[in-house]
Amino acid sequence: MRFSLLLCFLVSCGGPARIQIESNPEGALVTLNGVEKGRTPMVVREKFRGTADLLLELEGYEPYRSALNLRPRWYEVPPFDLIIPAKDRSFQIELEVEKTNHGALKRRALEFRP
């Protein structure tokens, strides 16, 4: 009985992580763990705790791929999470302009002409 109460207590503690994602320029499509979440700037509430895969895509810019550490900090685990509120995780990402080889692109376009 005591073990089941302790297990219920541990499972019920630790709410979802609040993740703020911003990009420069704004409007990048955010994909978190393979699921499209929306466009930047945005705030995501994620129950997953661990390492999450982040992908930002915006036309004219290189795709940005990274692993986000969403593991709980020491104060986000029981019993500390009942006393100390979890802090938002914030990520600011600078997107790089897509590198295009215009000469090769023009040659490929000419090859496709009928």
Image: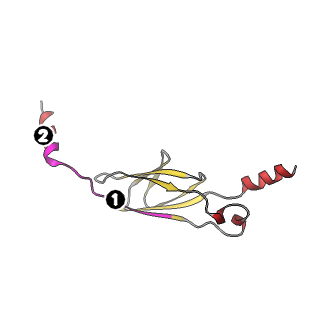
Say whether residue 82 is left or right of residue 25.
right
> For residue 93: magenta?
yes
Q: Secondary structure under badge 1?
A: loop
Say whether residue 8 is left or right of residue 49.
right
Reading the image, the residue beneath label 2 is: 107
Alpha-carbon distance for marks 2 and 1? 28 Å
Reading the image, the residue beneath label 1 is: 95
Residue toward you, 40 or 100: 100
When the figure is inspected, residue 110 is found, relative to residue 100, above or below; the finding is above
Kindly identify the residue that appears in the image at 30 percent across and 54 percent down: 61
Q: Secondary structure under badge 2?
A: helix
Which kind of residue does numbered mark 2 sit on?
Answer: Arg
Kindly identify the residue that appears in the image at 61 percent across and 63 percent down: 73
Which kind of residue does numbered mark 1 sit on?
Answer: Leu
Horizontal and vertical percent position of residue 91: 46, 63
Residue toward you, 77 or 90: 77
Q: How busy is the neighbourhood of tag 2: few (under 14 within 10 Å), some, or many (20 plus)? A: few
Kindly identify the residue that appears in the image at 67 percent across and 69 percent down: 84
Q: Which of marks 1 and 2 precedes in the sequence?
A: 1
Say whether residue 19 is left or right of residue 9.
left
Horizontal and vertical percent position of residue 35: 49, 46
Horizontal and vertical percent position of residue 72: 61, 59
